[in-house]
Amino acid sequence: MKNTTQARGAPYDVPAQVNFIEQGDGPPVILVHGLAASLHDWDDLLPDLSAAGYHAYALDLLGHGESPRMDARSYKMKWVFKHFTNWIDSLALSEAPIFIAHSLGGYLCLQYALRNPGRVRALVLINPFYKLSQLPAALRHTYRHPRINAFVAGRLPQWIYRAAIDISNHLLGRNGESDSTLSERVRQQTALDYKRTAPGAFNLPNTLRDLTSSLPRVSTATLLLWGDRDQTLAPDSFPPMLAALPNARGQTFAGGHVIHQSNPVLVNRLVLEYLSSLNK
């Protein structure tokens, strides 16, 4: 079921409206996508969660999908975080939710867990972003020029995004017995999501604070999953993260940055098995 909601008023002139979908009945699970993506990241996982007896919610973050786009040349994480937390508050959940998040969404959920440790049942983090140095040097340099980023991102046609996605998809290809490629449906949705992301949102990584020193304070039960061929966030950044989290287990996959989309059958099974283990 698709919804929009008006969360509580927020500072920084952050819009209150949030576009989200929900499905199923049972314990709440909140799904959070990454940069330049949308709630459609979870098209394969949402029905599986519902069938397993969970009430799953997936939102479009501020400046993404069909949620509002702020008129700003560069976005700040505090705006996105406030939009996100106000929406959670508006749901008036009767119990602490489980958070499942990818990339930039992982940063948001780590921040939420640090600030609200009693309001998070568990975390499932997929290739999470927690420090700027995870990015390749070229991307880090690019994020130092937010106005140029916004100008370019706002003018690129969708076919350019699609071509870049197809080339990356072809190069990733197969790795031994593992197929790391994305389906036609996912590639088309990814190109659309890039194009409709607010240009200023591409500045968000430049406004993150390094969470490395805070990871030992995240006592929430956590499952960490990552691809060993991630070209967006350095794969060697995830084992130290796993070691720093006091209540975490982890697994690496033969795959890239979006293993939940390239290998949804396996990822979904592991996620559901982990959620089931929380009740034992």
Image (spheres, rainbow, N blue to C red):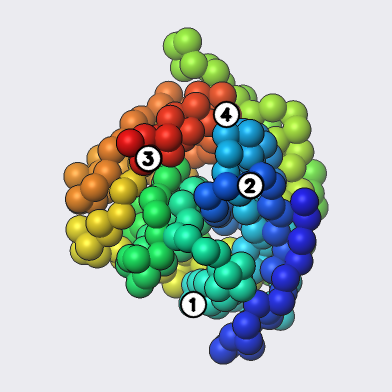
Measured in 3D between alpha carbons, the distance from the residue under mark 3 to the one under mark 1, in whole angstroms, is: 34 Å
The answer to the question of whether label 4 and label 3 lie on touching residues, with beta carbons closer than 8 A, is no
For residue 78, which numbered disc appears in the image? 1
Q: What's the residue type where badge 1 is placed? A: Lys
Q: Nearer the viewer, mark 3 or mark 1?
A: 3
Measured in 3D between alpha carbons, the distance from the residue under mark 3 to the one under mark 2, in whole angstroms, is: 17 Å
Q: How many marks?
A: 4
Q: Secondary structure at mark 4?
A: helix
For marks 4 and 3, the one nearer the N-term is: 4
**What residue is disc 2 on?**
25
Closer to the camera, 191 or 115? 115
Residue 273: image x %, image y %?
43, 30
* Residue under the point 39% across and 51% down: 122
Measured in 3D between alpha carbons, the distance from the residue under mark 4 to the one under mark 3, in whole angstroms, is: 23 Å
Residue 71 horizontal side relative to residue 116, left or right? right
Q: Secondary structure at mark 2?
A: loop
Q: Nearer the viewer, mark 2 or mark 1?
A: 2
Q: Secondary structure at mark 3?
A: loop
